[in-house]
Image (cartoon, rainbow, N blue to C red):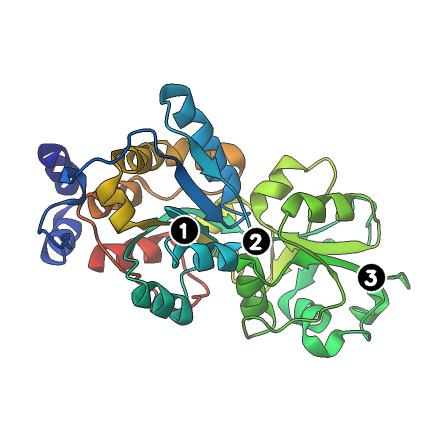
Amino acid sequence: MKATAKRIALGLGVLILTASCNNASTTESGENITELAISNPLEAIKIDGSSTVYPITEAIAKEYKKLNKVPVEVSFSGTTSGFEKFCKGEIDIANASRPILKEELKTCTSNGVLFTELPIAFDALTVAVHPQNTWAKEIAITELKKIWEPAAQGKITNWNQIRASFPDRPLKLYGADKKSGTFDYFTKAVVGKSGESRDDYTASEDDEVLVSGIAKDPNALGYFGYAYYEENKDKLKSLAIDSGKGAIPPSRETVEKAQYQPLSRPLFIYINIKSAQKKEALRNFVNFYIKQAPTTVASVGYVPLSKDAYQLANVQFYKGKAGTVFGGETSLDLTIGEVLRKRAEF
C-alpha cells in the first residue's frame, strides 16, 4: 500500500508531492490510516447528509455492495443535519454540498471527531421552470435576489413583478429547506448571506419533491442540484443565469470553463478518521469511492474533478489528512482548478 501511495503522489508532480509530504497528518500512534486495527468486517458503514451528493454516493454504494458483503447505509437529511450527526460520531461519512462551517467545526472538535475532507465533484446549481413557461429563458442574479430575499415574502407573488415583460401570472416557488447545504449556498450566492430567504415557498430536502412540484405547475420556479435536472429534462426547463456578464446556461462545459458563476460549487464527502482507523471496510469503501467517482459523477449528471484531484484525494485519505481548506466558510466562485490548488497546498 505504501508503494502504491508513493506512485500516486509522484504522478502529481513536485508541488502536490511536496505539499502532501510536508503536511502529512498521522494518527495518534504515528501510523498511516490504512495500517491500523480491524473491527467487525461486516459492521455497517453509515452515511448521511446532502441530497445533492446522495445520487453519487448511493450509486457507488450500490456497486460496492455487489462486490462485498459489508452493509452500506446511505440516507439524506440535508448537509446541516448530516454534519450534526457526523460531529456527534453517529455516522462514518457525511455527504455535503458545502464546506463544513465554523460552528460545526467547533462541535466536531469538542466531540473529538477528526475528519478528512474530500471534494468529489462539481455541481451547477440549477434554476428550473415548467416547459410550458415560454416567457423566461434566462434570469439575472439580481432578479433572483428580488424573488428570494426575505423582503419579498408576501410581496413578490407574480411573474410580472420580476420583470415587466413577464406575464401577470402567479409565481409558485420551490427550493431547498433550511437544513440543506443547497439552501446555504443558494442564499449566499443570490441574496448575499447564508440563511437569508423568504419562507413562503415549498421547501424540501427531497429534491424529487421539488422536481415533481415544478413539473406539475407552469407557474413554478425552483432550484436544486444539476443531476436532478439532468434526470428530468423532459419535465423541466433550466434557466440561463446572468451574473452581469451575459446569460450562461448550466452545463458540464460552463462549469469546467468557470463560466457558470456564482452557482457552480464543489461537492464533498467527509470521513471520520477514527472510524476509518478502526474499520477496514470503511477504508476499502472510501478507496473504492475515489476510484469510481470520475465515472459515477458523470453518469449521474454532475461534473467530475480532474484526474489529479482524485489522485490527491487518494493520497490525502491514505495519510489521514485532517481538517478543512475552507476556513469554516462557504466559498463562492470556486473553480475546479482552485479547489485542486487549495488541496495541494493543504
- Residue that carries the numbered disc 2 in the rendered image: 125
Front residue of this view, candidates 329 and 274: 274
The part of the image, by quadrant, that contains residue 278 is top left
Task: Write down the residue under mark 1.
Answer: 90
Distance of mark 3 from mark 2, alpha carbons?
Answer: 20 Å
Q: Which mark is residue 265?
A: none
Residue shown at 51% from the left, 50% from the top:
50
Hey, which residue is sitting farthest bottom in the picture? Answer: 151
- Mark yes or no: residue 259 visible: no
Q: Outermost residue, front direction?
A: 40
Q: Secondary structure at mark 2?
A: loop
The residue that appears at 46% across and 27% down in the rendered structure is: 62
The one nearer the camera, 164 or 23, is 23
Q: Nearer the viewer, mark 1 or mark 2?
A: 1
Tell me if residue 23 comes above or below residue 105 in the rendering.
above
Is residue 44 shown left or right of residue 134?
left
Going by the numbered disc 2, the residue's amino acid type is Leu
Where is 268 relative to 157, above or below? above
Task: Name the residue nearer the viewer: 197 or 37.
Answer: 37
In this rendering, position of residue 160 left or right of residue 202: right
Residue 82, how many percent across, how many down? 47, 54
Q: Residues within 10 Å of mark 3 (few under 14, many from 20)?
A: some
Please name the amino acid that badge 1 sits on.
Glu
First in residue order: circle 3 vs circle 2: 2
Q: Amino acid at mark 3?
A: Leu
Q: Measuring from the top left, give residue 118's x and y in whole percent.
A: 33, 49
Of discs 1 and 3, which sits in the foreground? 1
Residue plotted at (33% across, 43% down): 306
Q: Earlier in the sequence, mark 1 or mark 2?
A: 1
- Disc 3 is placed on an element classified as loop
Where is residue 47 drawn, in percent x and y?
Answer: 44, 43
Q: Circle 3 is placed at which residue position?
A: 171
